[in-house]
Image (cartoon, helix red, strand yellow):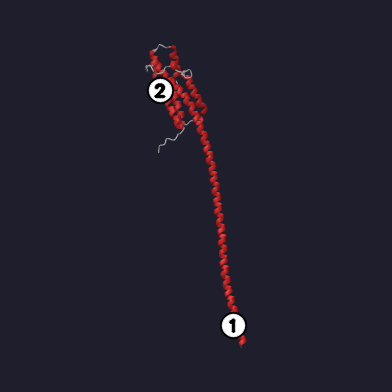
Amino acid sequence: MVTVIVLQVITLVILGCLFLFKNYFLSYSTEKGKNLATKEDIEEITKKVEGIKNGYISEVEQLKAELVLFSRKNDILFDEKVRVFKAFQKALVSFKQYCEAALGTYDTRGEFHPTLESLDEADKKPALVHIHALHQIQLEDFIFLSEASNLALDELYEACQIMPSMELHLIANEDDRNLADSTIPVYESAITNINQCLQSLYDELEFPTGKN
């Protein structure tokens, strides 16, 4: 009888131990599974973050390269615009000085006003030569000119188209006062158009003005 009771007690103890071990094992396995799942989740998230980070860095580097290329293109374009502006400025100022000297010659502008005789040899050329020089620059560098600048130059040519024949008549009729007087508005109009061309070409350079 006692043996049976002892065996039953041992059985109960073993069953109790097995039950406790089972619960502990299940609890441990569950926690271990959670930890394993959390680790895998972290690794997956880390991979995604690294992928996004690498993609972002790649896009930034590509953008930087594009900006450098864009900046270089703009620098080259600006240098070319400056070169063209200087060429036009030289030709236009020379033509303007010629027109002002013509006004001093054919009109009463005061004793200190320049005349054709006072011009340097580089500027003392017929209007046709000045116009041709401007037109040649426009033909060679039209790609760097805006529509506004091309229009301003065309208006200048239109205002000056009468000059070559007018000056030939002046040479043949030096004493014709009426003919000399008729040249005044032509040269004045040319000067106005020259100033407009210079302004348009300068605006095309797009220097910062500091205005908001």
Secondary structure under tag 1 reads helix
Which of the pair 164/194 is nearer the observer?
194
Q: Position of residue 59 (x, y in %)?
A: 54, 46
Numbered badge on residue 9: 1
- Residue type at mark 2? Ser
Name the residue carrying label 2: 189
| Image position of 50 (left or right of 169) | right
What residue do we see at 48% from left, 26% from top?
88
| Image position of 182 (left or right of 60) | left
Which of the pair 201/153 is nearer the observer?
201
Quarter of the rendering containing residue 2: bottom right
**Few, some or many residues within 10 Å of mark 2 (<14, 14–19, 20+):** some
Confirm or deny contact between disc 1 and disc 2 (CB under 8 A): no
If the image is split into quadrants, where does the C terminus sit?
top left
Secondary structure under tag 2 reads helix
Q: Position of residue 167 (x, y in %)?
A: 44, 16
Q: Is residue 166 visible?
A: no
Q: Position of residue 125 (x, y in %)?
A: 47, 18
Lower sequence index among marks 1 and 2: 1
What residue do we see at 52% from left, 27% from top?
140
Mark 1 or 2, which is nearer the eye?
1
Note whether 71 is above or below 135 in the view shown: below
- Residue type at mark 1? Val
If the image is split into quadrants, where does the N terminus sit?
bottom right
